[in-house]
Image (tube, rainbow, N blue to C red):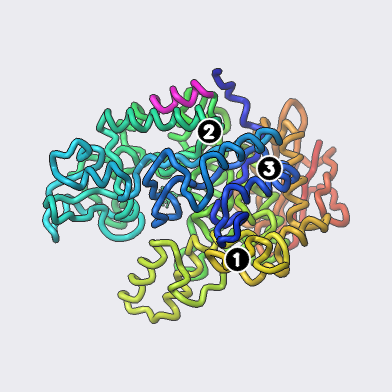
Amino acid sequence: MKKTRNDFKSLVGYQIYPKSFKDSNADGMGDISGIIEKLPYLSDLGIDFIWLNPLYKSPQVDGGYDISDFYQVDQMFGTLDDLKKLIKEAHALGIKLIMDLVINHTSDQHPWFLESKKSKDNPYRDYYHWEDAEPDKMPNDWKSFFGGSTWTYDDQTGQAYFHVFAKEQPDLNWKNPKLREEIYQMIRWWLDLGIDGFRLDAISHIQKEDWSFEIKGPHGNDPWEPFMNVRGIEEYMLKIKEIFDDYGALTVGEASGVTSKAARSWTGSKGYIDMIFELEHNAKEENNPNNKIDLKVYKETIIRWQEDLSEEGWNALYIENHDNPRSIDVFGDGSLQSAKALAVHYMLLRGTPFIYQGQEIGMTNFPFENINQFEAPESRNYYEALLKEGLDPKDSLTRVAVVSRDNSRTPMQWTNQLEAGFTSAKPWFPLNPNYREINVAENEHDPKSLLSLYKKLISLKHERKEISEGSIEFYDRENPQIFSYKRSHEGRELLVLVNLSATPTSTSFNDFEGFKELTLDQTGLKPLSSKMDLDPFEYRLYER
Ligand code: TEU
């Protein structure tokens, strides 16, 4: 079966962080059977496919992105049979399922690495990157994404191994054909099992520069340049693509460092994957300790990606995921109105929107009070670094709290009952105390809720070719508060107008005749005219 490249253009994805979605067996931890229980909810929401964060066997140093067995489901989530059941039941509801594919690195507890560590001549030594080093002299000065060096010294063999993430996540050596073959087989094994595709984790890092590559400091090149979309990666990606094509797999790449121009060849008609998550839009206001988005940079980034992929290539659209704090606090002002404006402005762009669990009900950041509450390794590292810089513990905590990805990993808020209906035991991570007001049950009964708005936006995406296939044209490009764009397809037009800020603003139109308003959930019409005044976080939709 060869895939047709148009398949995914009208789809909407939903991302599940399994630990925190729904606990079915009262151990405080979300699991696969919990996801099965909630399939009717997802079907009612109207999404087309689920992306599951890693469920593989893992010591959980990095939320499951440290895999110790690619072929097993971690027992905390259930069994492989549970997963097969999930695939079957999702398919029965017309929902596809894609899984995280983590092939840049493994856990340091993976049997390959345990072997690799044993000696320099172990047959698995070359599955990873090992280089001569001394305890205080590493092969180069490259920096890990999670803080510190990319190298960890090993006493036993007098060499260091390479890792772009935590030291418990050694990078695989893609130059080794045997390793590559093992990975290709594993990909086929999962597709044979019946999953519909993959979200390719950190895929742009699998190829590295020569170890002699020099990082030129904060104003020279990017500190991560030596492992971002480095030449030579094409060969590996083309081979992976061949497998995907054999199965008609649905694929989305997390590929930081792939520029908007390069993304055309990654995702276009001859590309390796269907669509790509850009990571550039997450830039924050400089020197703003509250971690607020820089709207100007954000808008420029989104417009550039939309335009660069307007003819060739495809965007995966998102405002939240398991790696970032909650959008309502980063982009919004914490109000429901801001969450709604955010939903409207991104769901109707050109691309495939992803909704992260809890985003559809407006879940917020967690009120951290203590550094021991953090799970994410880089949050703890960052805290230590701030203390070292001389910041006091209280301020350090505040700084870590606003940026930590743990904010989005708190349990899903289903009801206002005990533990928000997530579990009947003690949850693995405390619930955000605001579950009494913010939860699915409250949202479900209210036609003006955020959830109801998401349902409408998803239906629009399915029904309107302007949104799924249409071209896009941006207006008032210079005003960072305004998100104003037109989607057009075969003579039909849809105009989206959003004030993405907490202050009133206005914008003007030359060509406004003939548009009529399409209301989402607002009260009162506001005809399109040459000058439009918009309240904080106001949104409007017009068709012609
Ligand atoms: O994140 C990877 C990731 O964010 C980097 O690829 C990115 O390039 C870098 O942070 C610079 O912006 C993925 C997962 O989403 C994350 O949860 C994992 O911790 C990580 O990979 C390691 O597997």
Residue 110 lies, in percent from the top left, at 32, 46
Q: Mark 2 or 1 closer to N-term?
A: 2
Is residue 285 found left or right of 6 in the rendered image? left
Q: How crowded is mark 2: few (under 14 residues within 10 Å), some or many (20 or more)?
A: many
Label 3: which residue?
348
Q: What residue type is labelled 3?
A: Leu
Q: Does the magenta stretch include residue 123?
A: no
- Name the residue located 29 percent from the left edge and 52 percent from the top edge: 220
| Quadrant of the image occupied by residue 183 | top left
User: Magenta: predominant secondary structure element?
Assistant: helix
- For the record, the magenta segment spans 237-247
Label 2: which residue?
197
| Quadrant of the image occupied by residue 81 | top right
| Quadrant of the image occupied by residue 441 | bottom right
Note whether residue 509 is visible.
no
Tell which of 452 and 502 is nearer to you.
452
Q: What residue type is labelled 2?
A: Gly
Note whether residue 323 is visible.
yes
Residue 413 lies, in percent from the top left, at 66, 61
Tell which of 234 and 33 is nearer to you.
33
Pair 3/2: label in front: 2
Q: Which amino acid does label 1 sit on?
A: Ala
- Name the residue located 48 percent from the left edge and 23 percent from the top edge: 270
Task: State whether label 2 is within 8 Å of ligand 1.
Answer: no
As drawn, the label of residue 425 is 1
For the view shown, which residue lies furthest in the right direction?
Answer: 524
Is residue 492 found left or right of 271 in the rendered image? right
Q: Mark 1 or 3 closer to N-term?
A: 3
Disc 3 to disc 2, how far (Cα)?
24 Å
